Image (cartoon, rainbow, N blue to C red):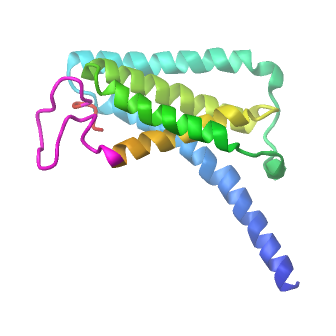
Amino acid sequence: MTPEDGISLTMEYLTLAVAWGLIPLIMGGLVVVARSLVARAEGAERVTAARAGWWAGLLLFVIYFVHSLPAFRPPDPLSVGTFSLGLWPILLGAVLGFGLLWGLSFLSAARVGGLVVLLLTVAGLGSLHTYIFLEDRGEWLVAGVLGGALGALLHLIVFPGHLTGSKEGEDENPPPGGMGGYGV
């Protein structure tokens, strides 16, 4: 085996690890975050909104799943080379994810929690299903969801206390419009 063959083999394994390990892990992580938001909700309104968001997200996923059944295909881990993510859907998703979190900071905590849980649930399950099981792999959807997650995380980096209502040095008592009570 030549050094070039070793590098090529390493790159193939790395590509497979990212494509069939890291990317699905990120998409599944969105669902785990949504479920943890439901579990951490405090107060009757927040619990109701979070649970409703979870079930609405699952319902939307089921609707999407049934709608996409004609394009179903078994997973093919070796077809990594046929998948690519466009820069525009990632950028659009990042801008929307950032803007969504910014805009949600103006709503009541109960509404924000329910909407965030709904979006995380349907985005995580829908993109994971599309990525693994659909023939065209929905590059726009997958790229948009990954970009949206990036935008939301960038929002939390730039404005860490924006959704919780806390400022530097403050610990508790978030004002209305934050996600206090959701563990975010």
| Residue drawn where x is 27% and y is 28% of the image | 41
Magenta: main secondary structure? loop
Residue 102 screen position, x and y as percent: 35, 31
Q: How many marks?
A: 0
Q: Name the side, left or right, on which 117 lies relative to 60.
A: left
- Which residue range is magenta in the image? 158-179
Would residue 168 be found to the left or right of residue 63 on screen? left
Place of residue 99 in the rendered image (x, y in percent of width and height, measured from the top left): 43, 31
Q: Nearer the viewer, residue 93 or 24?
A: 93
Give the residue furthest to the right. Answer: 1
Look at the image and say whether residue 58 sits in the magenta stretch.
no
Left or right position of 92 against 100: right
Q: Is residue 145 visible?
A: no
138 vs 58: above or below: below
Query: Which corner quadrant of the image does residue 3 belong to?
Result: bottom right
Residue at 29% x, 20% y is 107
Using the rendered view, name the quadrant where residue 165 is placed: top left
Instruction: Give the camera-side residue of 40 and 92.
Output: 92
Q: Which quadrant does the N terminus fall into? A: bottom right
Q: Is residue 39 visible?
A: yes
In this picture, is 80 found above or below 111? below
Residue 176 inside the magenta-drawn segment: yes
Quadrant in which the C terminus is drawn: top left
Is 51 above or below relative to 12? above
Where residue 111 sits in the image (x, y, percent)? Answer: 32, 18
| Residue 103, image x, y percentages | 36, 26
